Image (spheres, rainbow, N blue to C red):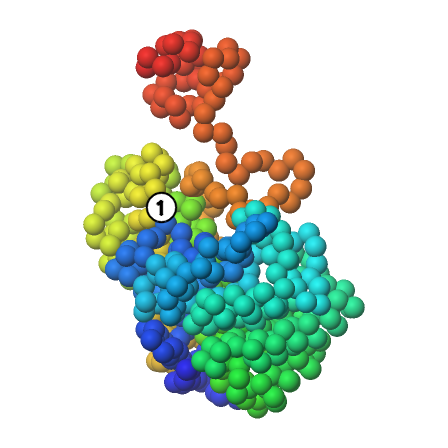
Amino acid sequence: MFEVLSHVDPNAVGPRLGRLSITGRREFETPNFFALTSRGVIPHLTPDVIAAHTRVGGVHIALEDFIERAVTGTPPIMNCPGSSPLHTFTALPKALPTLLAPRRTPAVSAPNGNSNTAISIFTSTGFQVLSNKSYLSYIEKLQPDIAIALADVPYGTLPGTKRIAKMGDRTQEWLSQLLNEKRKEQVVFAPVLPIDFLDQSEYLNSIADDLADEVSGLAFYDSNLLPDIPATTAITDLPRLSLDEPSSPRQILRQISLGMDILTIPFVGFATDAGIALTFRFPRPLSTHAATSKGVGALQLGVDMWPAVHSTSVDPLDTSCTCYTCTSHHRAYVQHLLSAKEMLGWVLLQIHNHHILSEFFSSIRKSIKDGSFEADCEEFAKVYESEMPEKSGQGPRVRGYHFKSEGPGEPKKNKAAWGNLGSDDQEVDSDLVPDETADESDAKGFAGRMEA
């Protein structure tokens, strides 16, 4: 399934090249990334667009997206027919590998902790419990190409000493149950918990000594643990998946420098929703980029497309980019779509941003092959800023099951689309009539507004 093609030193931590092959799916070279999905869909991209205009290695799908709190019946996805129900239900391209995890990345913190037999998940209808027994039944039915075993991960909280002792034991038990009951051809990645290596050494040693032939990969919730994995164990040649949520390209490079093979990258979707077109290249720009507002110094990692300065620009999002968006449209058009809140604006940005990320990983693989990865990382750090640009405009309407209120007084994610028409003291949303002020609109009264 996974072949390590080359690495700097097999006995030391460092970047490496590999190839992941899954029966019936498109093989891909690593380091690479899996695109994150929402209810089985890469946000803003339809399956035909994914096939025609992206080069993602695979997709990360969260089971909690498909489970709903129903009194009777089963989730619709469990009634999906075919040899690959997950592909059938999501309509994803057949060549694209699927990875099923219990929770989203990033996951919403649950108010209740996990138990010896189940974890808390956040569904579209609220929090509920997912038992390991149920999770195994979902894996058996959905037949994902890769399944991540259930893990006792305390999202959003720091576990105490007693809790840490339970985490390894629970995760080891859940993994053993999955390996004992899975189909023979089912690929399973064992989770590596976000706690110190010594606190889960017994669990990891059991994988290396007893389960190395049954486990097909490792899923790290904390990439900093990679250097602690002994190079003498059988699990060092397994593919390594990161669920560590890097927030910038520099963090991607750091994870790869530790030997990570496959990454999940939430900031790509965040940038698209914020109206930001990514422009970074590795290790340096392919052409001259506009300087940042600081004048001289590091270049920005992306361009905010909300400012009106782009409304008359016929330049592509990135002059050196060959994606569909940059070869077919210009900045003025994308800026107009965002201002008009047309969904196509975010579609074009998502196509571009995933293309930039694919090119980024392709350059990384070439750099590792040429033996210049360390020097190229240093150059990248000098050329580009360390963090993504700040969001300035309003993104698309968020879906409620993506978010959870974290405290009192938190503002609503979505502001009201319409004002209270007919009330003299109610300010009408300016989006109703773009070319007039709220006071002018109020002066017309209800009939005047309807006539306008």
Q: Position of residue 14 (x, y in %)?
A: 49, 80
User: In which quarter of the view is residue 121 placed?
Assistant: bottom right
Q: Position of residue 152 (x, y in %)?
A: 65, 67
User: In which quarter of the view is residue 231 placed?
Assistant: bottom right
Give the residue type that dot 1 points to.
Trp
Q: Which residue is at the front of the view, 301 or 174? A: 174
110 sits to left or right of 26: right
| Picture residue at 32% right of the left edge, 73% below the top | 26
Q: Position of residue 47 (x, y in %)?
A: 32, 57
Query: Residue 6, relative to residue 163: is it above or below?
Result: below
109 sits to left or right of 34: right
Q: Which residue is at the front of the view, 176 or 268? A: 176
Q: Which residue is at the front of the view, 224 or 38? A: 38
| Picture residue at 36% right of the left edge, 62% below the top | 88
Q: Position of residue 116 (x, y in %)?
A: 71, 68
Label 1: which secondary element: helix
| Picture residue at 66% right of the left edge, 64% below the top | 118
Is residue 318 visible to us here?
yes
| Picture residue at 57% right of the left edge, 47% below the top | 125
Per the image, the residue denoted by label 1 is 346
The quadrant of the rendering that contains the C terminus is top left
- Mark 1 surroundings within 10 Å by alpha-carbon count, few (fewer than 14), some (14 through 19), many (20 or more): many
Number of callouts? 1
The quadrant of the rendering that contains the N terminus is bottom left
362 sits to left or right of 330: right
Is residue 104 visible to us here?
no
The residue most toward the front is 72
Query: Residue 219, relative to residue 287: is it above or below?
Result: below
Query: Residue 93, relative to residue 20: is it above or below?
Result: above
